[in-house]
Amino acid sequence: MIIVLLGPPGSGKGTQVERISKELGFYKISMGDLLREAITKDDEIGKKAKNHLVDGKLVPDYLVLEMVRRELEKEKGKGDIVFDGFPRNLNQAISFDRLLNLAGKKIDIVLYFDIPFALLARRLSQRRVCPRCSTVYNLETAPPRSHNICDKCGSTLVKRRDDSEKIVKSRFQVYERETAPVEEFYKRRRNLLIKICSDGSKDEVWKEIKKHIEKKSYKENSNQKGG
Ligand code: AMP
């Protein structure tokens, strides 16, 4: 099964993608994490992507598409994949269809993380992340057990550079201009969009997501059995 997580910055995709991967065994492709890793490694893609991330702008399509192609190559044959933060504009969505076609795959569901705009800026200002294992915390609603230390691996938590007030503004603008049309594309042209109310607790959101994934997988299994 292929799942795409779509939603504005701070809508909780990063937290839920971890659970989909750990609890349901999906192979995770989180574009933001992959790009940050490439920047840390200072490899060819990282060098080209760096300034775009710092400014809160989209990295050029050819770079993210190359990354997706490599990840699909790595995943080969394992089956279930969840994409977080990709596609982020219409060109990526259309190129993604082509890449999946070549790999004999198709998107099964697009989960759209719906949340009141006013909550997003607050969430991002309180967000801290583990630079080692990418676990996401919120100082108000989901703090680590020890101040600023990752519960899972003991690393010191950091605030993402692009979570500063100024860059967040630019990321919201980019979302409205580039990514909102992708929502419409999956909703009206592909009929794949499922809305998830993501202003609840992490567990409430998770329950809703799991319900949709299980329902889809049940439908697929009974279709296969029924021929
Ligand atoms: P995220 O961790 O998903 O918020 O992504 C952080 C940053 O990575 C974004 O602000 C972009 O600069 C870049 N990025 C992530 N995914 C993409 C994508 N699909 N296309 C272009 N840039 C991306």
Image (cartoon, rainbow, N blue to C red):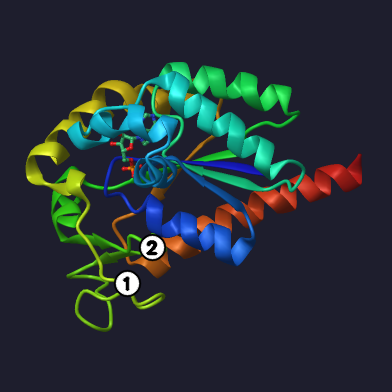
Q: Residues within 10 Å of mark 2 (few under 14, many from 20)?
A: some
Q: Nearer the viewer, residue 11 or 220?
A: 11
* Residue 194 sits above or below residue 207 on the image: above
Is 221 left, or right, of 54 in this rendering? Answer: right
Q: Quadrant of the N terminus?
A: top right
Q: Quadrant of the C terminus?
A: top right
Is 220 left, or right, of 23 in this rendering? Answer: right
Q: Residue at x 41, y 25 (%)?
A: 182
Mark 2 to mark 1: distance in Å?
7 Å
* Residue 41 sits above or below residue 105 on the image: below
* Residue 120 sits above or below residue 142 on the image: above
Residue 72 in which image quadrant: top right
Does the CB distance between marks 2 and 1 fall below 8 Å?
Answer: yes
Q: How far across and how far down the image is residue 29, in percent?
A: 52, 44
Q: Which residue is mark 2?
A: 132
- Looking at the rendered structure, the secondary structure element under dot 2 is loop
Label 2 sits on what residue type?
Arg
Q: Residue at x 56, y 64 (%)?
A: 22
Observer able to see residue 6: no
Task: Indicate which disc residue 155 carries.
Answer: 1
Label 1 sits on what residue type?
Ser
